[in-house]
Image (cartoon, coloured by chain):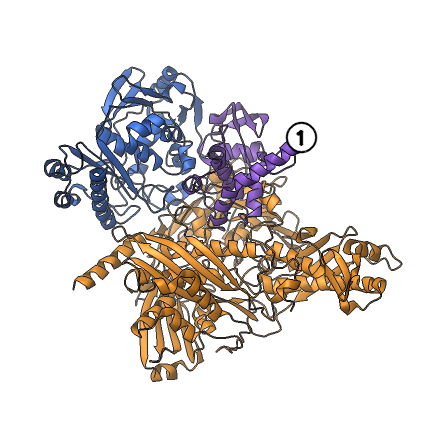
């Protein structure tokens, strides 16, 4: 399985990189660590005409401490470097956990934060070789009009398996997207769509350059359930945040990942515990409302019923972890 | 598709190579530089037989990265661990503690193990598990591989002692 | 048989003699082979599970620059890709599973070969497929092969002893159903074949394999060559796990392309293609019945199995037979009946997973035994121990178990696992279970003989070279052979060099399957070494003025047993034997064929205890520890034995808890090492190894086998432990993945609430 024909370009100038993206539009793809894009090119699921490597964009690889106590992290920073970064571990332990949870050490030695945030959605019906896919009608992801997972679906239901965005959402992080004409800021919470195909609001001519995390002193937690530790994409993952101490809270946020096309920011469950605290009864009441907010789950990678049950389990474990931290 | 010139330092030797846009680092190691110790396996980053070390001595998967991304960089493959006719301590540990069976994953697993001890000379169980979980050793179930990694420090220190004594005599 | 104290090499912890090569990137595997002019071959596979081929037009592919050949069925003259099984190399008329070989190209490079598959135009008439065994058995179901009515490939019943009478007279009858899922052997080295058939009289194939001989016997007749004209080179095999026991279509295709282009051709399975051409386990449905007396004596078993053989079942029924037979290897039964109905479906042909069908049937049987024990108020280990055979037992199909350490194995694991403090005393969802098993070491039946032969040459420097045809796919056979030769000749194992992996250079060997390596090849090597020894003994005895019978070869010396101070150096005797009037260059030859007509002479036995914990919220099973006791006869290399135990515990755990090929309409959904799950580092349990030596009369120095006996027994132990953790609920399906465990947890909790 060779990589398809394409042109590889690289530059150490951000300006030049943005120009290339602007010029090529959706004929180009950004390659950071390669662990996601090269993987998909291997399967010929992605066939960009131009691969624009950002490996040499040194300015996007740093962690900058901000005056307000927050951090601005270059999207090109390697996950391994971030995982070990003292300040990240110190100020944002749940975020550090979410980084450690990504794939394997090998992958994290190559992959970048931006790459994980932009991680392409995955589906058993597409994530195999071109030869393998020949036997299937084209689906939404492969220039067709159907979804193999739920035949009646009007959109792609591929799964977003990224772990770091869950922590970033509860932390209120903001992304900087730049193109040749300028830049814009998008909160991570608003970055994702519910379509497995065009799964983020990033335009083809835009590059994710920075992730800015505001100062946060609240309690946070990140938990991951996966078939094997240290290797797999999550079956379900959760990030949660609350203020206060013990069972006393006034704001709680909970985000679930890896079970749907995008991270699911829970509404009613979070409001219930925000109002009633983190006691057992309140948590139990909150859990009763989790399933309703999961939307239509698929059997991709694990059974829908299992995902629903595990979502409840992980939310419960996260809330208890918050209470005890 | 174009061909480009690039330089790559492999195990201390710098090569000028003509490389295609679509070649991965694994393709170049095996087919252009022609070092075949690094193996071709799943080519999608899941099995680890293609594992090599980057300039920092960290484990990376050569099958999912453009060769051209490594222009001007330095890597170590399995062939580069030995020095002066002697195997590296990690290789000796693998042999002594029975961590090799069929041998196909062995180059990738050894490079992963070497990366662990590069970073943590006396690794904890967690550090060993984390550093190895990305590779599959189907024959050993990783059991003796982990033991070999635990023993690396002792063997490496003994080697250092021996070298010191040799030079001082 | 010398007691252990008199052995100087056997029983030592011997690191692999080819360790330095394997650890330094020097070992050559088939994909590393590069031959001048070599072309890249790629195979076009059907994306339909069931179809008629109306036409194939390869002209556009042939016209591409760099394409040297495109072949289809019409270039094969009806060549079959197996000795039995009626499977043509290419589909010509009917396509019977997704992934079926339709055409192949050979091109100058991989990119061109890949591209050349696209313009091959195949016109199909799609036919309704039958993808599930249950559907295949329904009246009016589409037929996979037109000449197999009802999609039944075979339906055999074998009866041993008196099962009917036993069931009739039994006090109690227990029955359980059990079923398996589709799997892959998942060895590290992907399927690959490099063939040089550029000259007409010699076909050379580089490929990983468990048996070069069977490949010669398959390819020779297919290509009109005698078997010596087929040279199989298998210098290193990257794992086999019961999955490389024979030829596959891609071997033939590489040879056809090479013959057509008169150049070497490499065909390499890329990525998901691996999962189509690997033939492992299918979905089998078993119903087991056991007849037991009130006093706890097991009287008989009855196995009724429907086995999905896929589109070309070949020997699936035979493997099912072996799985059912296993019960009579551990229990002295009055009767055993095995019915295997092999069903065809439009899916990938099935063959053998690691541990054969035996691993999963053991999971069923050991759970059943635990259930029986529990219902009789008996401790499971006591129950098994009451029922196990002893050495000397004569089996129902003519076996004679010359050595058997089952009871000792059970006693060992009981003690070492802390069973008495744990069984029945653990917290909910924390379970402990026991399994026993036996494994035959021998393969009579493939041919009338089960012969291994070996040659030994001794250079005038005293370095010994052993020539053997047995493959080493990681189990350490080559080092074992070196140790055997070294023991006989009284030298160190590292003074023995091995030549293996090339049928042009090595004498016959049936191969490394059916666990025959240590016994059959080991005895052949021993005989060859003894032959060489005898030649040296003649010279040494004359020099030492003693009889040849009294000589001891040990620690590089040769001396009379009653006068060790007067010794000769081994290498000097070798030198002197050559540099003499006679001028004899010392060479030994030997072969070994089991003296019995039945399959084998020797069985290993084992018992294991597994301890597991279940997370009742997520269904995840943590295997905490596995205590293994294995009657190996004699442990030639304890270091390698431990490695085998580790790897097989891993494999059983993997198959019972993780491995499953998921599919939709015959399309495999998880054909990757990422999505097809095997445990990694965090999941591995503590493993304790206990090697029990019963010194078998047949194997070299009393050795039997350790290549597959462990994995089967672990299957039983882990399944029993999971069942125990669930309060005795019988798990009917493997793998026991988290969502299946969770269902059982809910069932248990509902039962307890009621």
Percent x, y of residue C367: 35, 66
Q: Which chain is orange?
A: C
Of C25 and A31, nearer the camera is C25
C276 left or right of C506?
left
Q: Mark 1 points at which residue?
A: B167
Relative to the observer, which residue lies in front, C166 or C445?
A: C166
Query: In the drawing, does residue B148 fall left or right of residue A68?
Result: right
> Is residue C264 something one can see in this rendering?
no
Task: Identify whether C189 is placed above or below C532.
Answer: above
Query: Label 1 marks which chain's residue?
Result: B
What hue represents chain A? blue
Look at the image and give the colour of chain B: purple
Q: Which residue is drawn at 10% across and 39% down?
A: A276
Q: Say if residue C131 shows up in the picture.
A: yes
> What is the quadrant of the C terminus of chain C in the image?
bottom left
| SS label for mark 1 | helix
Relative to C555, C30 lies left or right: left
The percent position of residue C522, horizontal first and vertical second, equals: 63, 62
Residue C30, how many percent across, how many down?
Answer: 57, 46
Q: Out of C661 and A48, give the one closest to the viewer.
A: C661
Can you name the residue that lies furthest to the right here?
Answer: C581
Label 1 crowd (10 A; few <14 / some 14-19 / many >=20): few
């Amino acid at each position: 399985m060779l990589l398809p024909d394409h042109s590889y370009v690289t530059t150490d100038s951000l300006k030049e990189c943005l120009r290339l993206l602007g010029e090529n539009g959706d004929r180009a793809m950004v390659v950071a660590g390669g662990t996601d894009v090269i993987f998909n090119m291997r399967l010929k699921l992605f066939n960009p005409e131009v691969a624009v490597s950002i490996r040499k964009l040194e300015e996007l690889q740093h962690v900058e401490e901000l005056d307000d106590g927050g951090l601005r992290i270059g999207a090109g920073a390697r996950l391994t470097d971030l995982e070990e970064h003292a300040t990240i571990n110190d100020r944002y332990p749940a975020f550090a956990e979410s980084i450690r949870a990504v794939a394997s050490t090998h992958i994290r030695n190559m992959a970048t934060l931006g790459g994980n945030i932009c991680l392409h959605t995955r589906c058993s019906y597409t994530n195999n070789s071109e030869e393998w896919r020949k036997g299937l009608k084209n689906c939404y992801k492969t220039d067709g009009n159907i979804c193999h997972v739920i035949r009646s679906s009007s959109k792609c239901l591929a799964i977003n398996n990224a772990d770091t965005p869950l922590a970033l959402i509860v932390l209120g992080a903001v992304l900087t997207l730049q193109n040749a004409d300028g830049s814009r800021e998008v909160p991570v919470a608003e970055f994702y769509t519910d379509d497995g195909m065009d799964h983020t609001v990033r335009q083809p001519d835009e590059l994710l350059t920075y992730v800015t995390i505001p100062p946060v002193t609240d309690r946070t937690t990140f938990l991951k359930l996966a078939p094997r530790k240290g290797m797999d994409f999550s079956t379900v993952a959760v990030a949660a945040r609350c203020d206060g101490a013990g069972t006393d809270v006034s704001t709680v946020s909970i985000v679930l990942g890896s079970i749907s096309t995008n991270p699911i920011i829970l509404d009613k469950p979070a409001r219930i515990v925000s109002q009633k605290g983190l006691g057992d009864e309140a948590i139990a009441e909150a859990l009763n409302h989790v399933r309703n907010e999961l939307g239509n789950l698929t059997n991709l990678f694990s059974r829908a019923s299992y995902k629903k049950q595990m979502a409840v389990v992980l939310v419960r474990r996260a809330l208890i972890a918050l209470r005890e931290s | 598709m174009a061909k480009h010139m690039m330089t790559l330092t492999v195990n201390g030797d710098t090569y000028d190579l003509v490389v295609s846009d679509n070649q991965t680092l694994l393709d170049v190691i095996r087919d252009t530089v022609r070092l075949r110790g690094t193996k071709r396996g799943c080519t999608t980053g899941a099995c680890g037989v293609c594992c090599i070390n980057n300039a920092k001595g960290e484990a990376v998967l050569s099958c999912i990265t453009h060769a051209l991304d490594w222009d001007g960089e330095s890597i170590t493959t399995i062939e580069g661990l030995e020095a002066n006719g002697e195997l590296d301590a990690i290789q000796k540990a693998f042999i002594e503690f029975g961590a090799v069976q069929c041998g196909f994953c062995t180059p990738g697993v050894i490079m992963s193990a070497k990366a662990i001890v590069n970073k943590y000379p006396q690794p904890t169980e967690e550090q060993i598990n984390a550093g190895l979980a990305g590779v599959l050793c189907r024959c050993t179930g990783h059991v003796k591989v982990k033991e070999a990694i635990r023993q690396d420090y002792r063997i490496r220190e003994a080697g250092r002692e021996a070298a010191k004594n040799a030079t001082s005599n | 048989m010398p007691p252990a104290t008199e052995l100087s090499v056997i029983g030592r912890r011997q690191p692999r003699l080819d360790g330095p090569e394997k650890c330094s990137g020097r070992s050559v595997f088939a994909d590393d082979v590069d031959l001048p002019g070599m072309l890249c071959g790629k195979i076009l596979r059907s994306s339909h599970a069931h179809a008629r081929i109306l036409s194939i037009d390869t002209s556009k592919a042939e016209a591409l620059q760099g394409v040297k050949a495109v072949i289809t069925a019409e270039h094969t003259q009806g060549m079959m890709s197996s000795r039995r099984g009626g499977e043509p190399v290419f589909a010509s008329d009917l396509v019977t599973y997704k992934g079926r070989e339709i055409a192949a190209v050979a091109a100058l490079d991989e990119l061109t070969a890949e591209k050349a598959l696209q313009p091959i135009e195949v016109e199909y008439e799609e036919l309704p497929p039958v993808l599930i065994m249950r559907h295949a058995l329904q009246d009016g179901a589409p037929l996979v092969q037109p000449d197999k009515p009802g999609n039944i490939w075979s339906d055999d019943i074998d009866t041993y002893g008196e099962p009917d009478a036993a069931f009739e007279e039994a006090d109690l009858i227990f029955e359980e159903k059990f079923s398996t899922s589709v799997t892959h052997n998942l060895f590290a080295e992907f399927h690959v074949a490099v063939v040089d058939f550029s000259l007409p009289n010699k076909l050379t194939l580089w490929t990983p394999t468990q048996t070069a001989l069977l490949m010669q016997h398959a390819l020779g007749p297919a290509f009109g060559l005698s078997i010596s004209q087929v040279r199989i080179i298998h210098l290193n095999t990257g794992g086999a796990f019961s999955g490389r026991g024979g030829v596959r279509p891609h071997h033939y295709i590489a040879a056809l392309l090479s013959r057509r282009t008169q150049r070497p051709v490499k065909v390499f399975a890329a990525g998901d293609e691996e999962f189509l051409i690997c033939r492992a386990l299918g979905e089998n449905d078993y119903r087991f019945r056991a007849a037991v007396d009130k006093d706890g004596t097991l009287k008989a078993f009855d196995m009724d199995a429907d086995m999905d053989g896929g589109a070309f079942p070949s020997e699936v029924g035979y493997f099912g037979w072996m799985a059912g037979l296993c019960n009579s290897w551990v229990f002295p039964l009055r009767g055993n009946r095995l019915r295997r109905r092999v069903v065809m479906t439009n899916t990938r042909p099935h063959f053998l997973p690691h541990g054969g069908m035996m691993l999963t049937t053991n999971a069923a049987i050991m759970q059943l035994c635990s259930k029986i024990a529990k219902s009789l108020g008996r401790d499971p280990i006591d129950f098994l121990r009451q029922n196990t055979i002893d050495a000397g037992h004569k089996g129902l199909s003519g076996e004679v178990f010359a050595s058997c350490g089952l009871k000792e194995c059970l006693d060992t694991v009981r003690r070492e696992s802390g069973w008495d403090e744990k069984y029945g005393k653990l917290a909910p969802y924390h379970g402990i279970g026991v399994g026993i098993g036996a494994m035959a070491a021998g393969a009579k039946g493939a041919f009338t003989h089960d012969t291994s032969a070996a040659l030994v040459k001794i250079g005038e420097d005293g370095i010994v070279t052993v020539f053997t045809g047995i493959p080493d796919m990681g189990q350490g056979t080559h080092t074992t052979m070196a140790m055997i030769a070294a023991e006989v000749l009284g030298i160190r194992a590292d003074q023995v060099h091995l030549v293996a992996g090339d049928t042009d250079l090595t004498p016959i060997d049936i191969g490394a399957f059916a666990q025959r390596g240590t016994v059959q090849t080991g005895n052949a090597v021993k005989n060859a070494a003894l032959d060489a020894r005898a030649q040296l003994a003649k010279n040494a005895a004359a020099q030492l003025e003693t009889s040849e019978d009294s000589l001891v070869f040990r620690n590089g010396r040769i001396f009379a047993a009653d006068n060790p101070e007067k010794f000769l150096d081994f290498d000097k005797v070798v030198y002197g034997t050559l540099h003499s009037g006679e001028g004899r260059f010392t060479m030994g030859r030997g072969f070994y064929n089991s003296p019995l007509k039945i399959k084998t002479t020797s069985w290993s036995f084992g018992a294991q205890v597994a301890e597991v914990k279940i997370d009742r919220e997520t269904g995840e099973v943590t295997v905490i520890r596995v205590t293994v006791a294995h009657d190996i006869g004699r442990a030639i290399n304890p270091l390698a034995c431990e490695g085998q135990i580790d790897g097989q515990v891993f494999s059983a755990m993997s198959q019972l808890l993780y491995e499953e090929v998921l599919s939709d309409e015959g399309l495999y959904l998880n054909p990757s090492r990422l999505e097809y799950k095997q445990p990694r580092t965090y999941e591995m349990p503590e493993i304790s190894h206990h090697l029990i030596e019963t010194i078998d009369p047949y194997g070299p120095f009393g050795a039997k086998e350790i290549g597959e006996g462990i994995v089967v027994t672990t299957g039983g132990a882990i399944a029993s432990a999971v069942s125990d953790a669930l309060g005795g609920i019988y798990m009917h399906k493997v793998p026991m993945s988290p969502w299946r465990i969770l269902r059982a947890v809910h069932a248990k909790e509902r039962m307890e609430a009621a």
